[in-house]
Amino acid sequence: MTDQNTSFPATEDMSLLIVDDDKPFQQRLARAMEKRGFETETADGVQDAAIKIAQHAPAYAIVDMRLEDGNGLDVIEKIHQKRPDARAIVLTGYGNIATAVTAVKLGAIDYLAKPADPEDILAALARKPEDKAQPPENPMSADRVRWEHIQRVYELCDRNVSETARRLNMHRRTLQRILAKRAPR
């Protein structure tokens, strides 16, 4: 059973692993993807996902970037070591360009901001490698680009506020206020 709006072959392996430590979101997404024809399995973190991948590497995966016991990029890497043809996407509420590039280098086919709509996730999973993603309806604002840059430098400085502020030539308290706020749209 597949949705008519997607291009999944009827005979294709529709196994899907959802790795997210936000249990309510994980369960809602699992139900939504099951309704669209996937055989879903869930994992709460890197360790749980590693066990499930070792037992059966899925054809598809949806992986949260930040997990309680590690980084979702480790899960992407494990999936592609076991099954190079797997199609995995990364979801994150803490997106930045550096991690998106790393995710793609490790084998992810797309990188979406949380909370992502199941239809957007399905479109990303179904997209052929040669097809380009549609340009965003609402591209990042200048404030969001600035925030992304600050987040990237902060991560590169191992989350050291003083070092990040020094490198950005910014007052430490100003940086702390920026980091305490949610990402601009």
Image (spheres, helix red, strand yellow):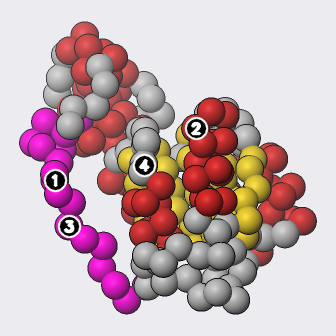
Provide the residue designation for mark 2. Answer: 25
Q: Quadrant of the C terminus?
A: top left
Q: Residue furthest right?
A: 55
> Which range of residues does the magenta coloring cover?
129-147
Local packing at callout 3 (Cα closer than 10 Å; few below 14, some 14-19, many 20+) is few
Query: Which residue shows up at 86% across the image and 55% down it?
Result: 51
Residue 94: in sight, yes or no?
Answer: yes
Mark 1 in CB contact with mark 3 (< 8 angstroms): yes
Per the image, label 2 sits on a secondary structure element best described as: helix
Q: Is residue 86 above or below residue 112?
A: below
Give yes or no for residue 148 being in the magenta stretch.
Answer: no
Query: Which residue shows up at 43% across the image and 43% down it?
Result: 114
* CA–CA distance in space, label 4 to label 2: 10 Å
Q: Which x, y percent locates residue 29?
A: 58, 48
Three-letter code for the amino acid on which mark 2 is drawn: Phe
- Give the number of the mark in front: 4 or 1: 4
Three-letter code for the amino acid on which mark 4 is drawn: Ala
Provide the residue designation for mark 4. Answer: 116
Provide the residue designation for mark 3. Answer: 135
Q: Earlier in the sequence, mark 3 or mark 2?
A: 2
In the depicted view, which residue is nearer to us: 147 or 34?
34
* CA–CA distance in space, label 2 to label 1: 25 Å
Three-letter code for the amino acid on which mark 3 is drawn: Pro
